[in-house]
């Protein structure tokens, strides 16, 4: 958008349908809402109109997720991302230098970052999940964890 706003100030980006077709909604902090409403009139080559959402929109949106109980070697972020999105650890490790992995809205560049229960992991291009809880150990001494994968 060219406003030099830190990505962590914007929050979620939702796609919702209304009677006019598909609309894009940014969930942003009230501190920068007025700046965006006044300043943004184009996104790339598309003319846009920014206006505050009606109060009932915030109440209507509730994220949905599916629970997954997975086995991981450790709560390292690369291992958890692999389990959540069904990919290999080596393939998922390529996402870190590409600056596509965030924990609680903070950029993570290290593959050995250890997640804590309650952490929300966002991976651009893949989705988001919450590390819900540790469930114990498997017979092969792997860690069993519960993830909430946002849909």
Image (spheres, grey):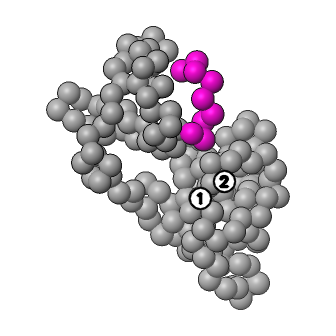
Q: Is residue 3 depicted above or below 122 in this figure?
A: above
Alpha-carbon span between mark 2 and mark 1: 6 Å
Find out whether residue 3 is within the magenta segment: yes
Residue 141 picture location, percent across and down: 76, 84
Viewer-nearest residue: 112 or 93: 112
Q: Quadrant of the C terminus?
A: bottom left
Q: Residue 97 location in percent, x, y?
A: 78, 39
Q: Residue drawn at (53%, 49%), measured in percent from left and top? A: 127
Q: Which residues are magenta?
A: 1-9
Q: Residue at x 43, y 61 (%)?
A: 65
Q: Main secondary structure of the magenta part?
A: loop
The answer to whether residue 87 shows anywhere in this view is no
Residue 128 position, x and y percent, is 54, 53
Q: Nearer the viewer, residue 147 or 90?
A: 147
Residue at the left extreme, as displayed? 19
**Extreme residue toward the bottom, this view:** 139
Residue at numbered disc 1:
120
In the picture, measured across the screen, residue 78 lies left or right of residue 57, that is right
Q: Are marks 2 and 1 in contact (CB under 8 Å)?
A: yes
């Amino acid at each position: 958008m060219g406003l030099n706003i830190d990505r962590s100030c914007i929050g979620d980006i939702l796609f919702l349908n209304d009677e006019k077709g598909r609309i894009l909604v940014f969930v942003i902090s009230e501190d920068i809402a007025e700046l965006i409403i006044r300043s943004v009139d184009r996104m790339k080559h598309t003319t846009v109109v920014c206006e505050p959402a009606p109060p009932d929109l915030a109440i209507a949106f509730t994220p949905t997720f599916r629970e997954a109980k997975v086995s991981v070697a450790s709560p390292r972020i690369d291992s958890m991302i692999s389990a959540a999105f069904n990919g290999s650890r080596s393939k998922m490790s390529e996402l870190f230098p590409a600056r596509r992995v965030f924990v609680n809205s903070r950029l993570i560049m290290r593959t050995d970052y250890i997640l804590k229960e309650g952490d929300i992991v966002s991976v651009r291009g893949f989705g988001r999940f919450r590390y819900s809880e540790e469930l114990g150990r498997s017979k092969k001494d792997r860690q069993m964890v519960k993830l909430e994968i946002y849909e």
